[in-house]
Amino acid sequence: MSAEPGNFRPVVRPMEHADIDTVLEIEGAAYQFPWSRQIFSDCLMAGYLSSVLDTGSRIIGYSILSTAAAEAHILNLCIEPDCQRQGYGQQMLDHLLEYADAVGVERMFLEVRPSNDAAIQLYENAGFVQLGIRKSYYRAAEGREDALVLVLENVSGAADLE
């Protein structure tokens, strides 16, 4: 299923508190162990870069980025499952890279499940490399799952590739 007919490109805009219900629906559809309403509210209140991907008729994705000094951390980047593998994850990542470059971020980090091949491919294509592993980081159906820690050392170089 396509987000919208034709060549329409959704718009990245700031997330608002009114968007959280829709964001929670996407989060619940995409993840077995979704974030809570409180986590999203806390990210908004903390002033993290919280964005949604809006088609004009509905939200199909979102991202959360924290920044401090010259570093950033992608806390969440998610596209509605029916809209995945259509370039929308790349659009959200490009938005984060452009923002990070504009505010002087030099290094960007994230965690990703080793089982999330599509996300790993997205990040590796942008220049992220594995820095390490966080043992038992994610909840899983049977206990815990490790997280790959990825880093992008040259944010400005990645933002320039678009």
Image (spheres, rainbow, N blue to C red):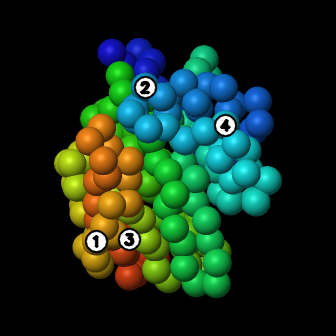
Tell me the CA gap for discs 1 and 3. 23 Å
**Mark 3 or mark 2, which is nearer to you?**
2
> Residue under circle 4?
37
Q: Which residue is found at the position 73% from the left and 51% from the top? A: 42
Tell me the CA gap for discs 1 and 2. 26 Å
Type of amino acid under label 4: Arg
Of the image marks 4 and 2, the number of the one nearer the N terminus: 2
Of the image marks 1 and 2, the number of the one nearer the N terminus: 2
Q: Quadrant of residue 65?
A: bottom right
Tell me the CA gap for discs 3 and 2. 30 Å
Which class describes the residues within 10 Å of circle 3: few (<14), some (14-19), or many (20+)?
Answer: some
**The disc label shown at residue 158, or none:** 3
Question: Secondary structure under badge 4?
Answer: helix
Tell me the CA gap for discs 3 and 4. 32 Å
Type of amino acid under label 3: Ala
Q: Is residue 138 visible?
A: yes
Q: Which residue is found at the position 38% from the left and 33% from the top? A: 32
Q: Which residue is found at the position 28% from the left and 71% from the top? A: 133
Of the image marks 1 and 4, the number of the one nearer the N terminus: 4
Tell me the CA gap for discs 1 and 4. 27 Å
Residue 44 position in % (x across, y down) = 74, 50
> Residue under circle 1?
133
Residue 139 position in % (x across, y down) = 38, 47
For the C terminus, the image quarter is bottom left
Residue 55 position in % (x across, y down) = 55, 26
Q: Which residue is found at the position 58% from the left and 30% from the top? A: 24
**The disc label shown at residue 86, or none:** none
Question: Secondary structure under badge 2?
Answer: helix
Is mark 1 in CB contact (under 8 Å) with mark 4?
A: no
Which class describes the residues within 10 Å of circle 1: few (<14), some (14-19), or many (20+)?
Answer: some
Q: Is residue 59 visible?
A: no
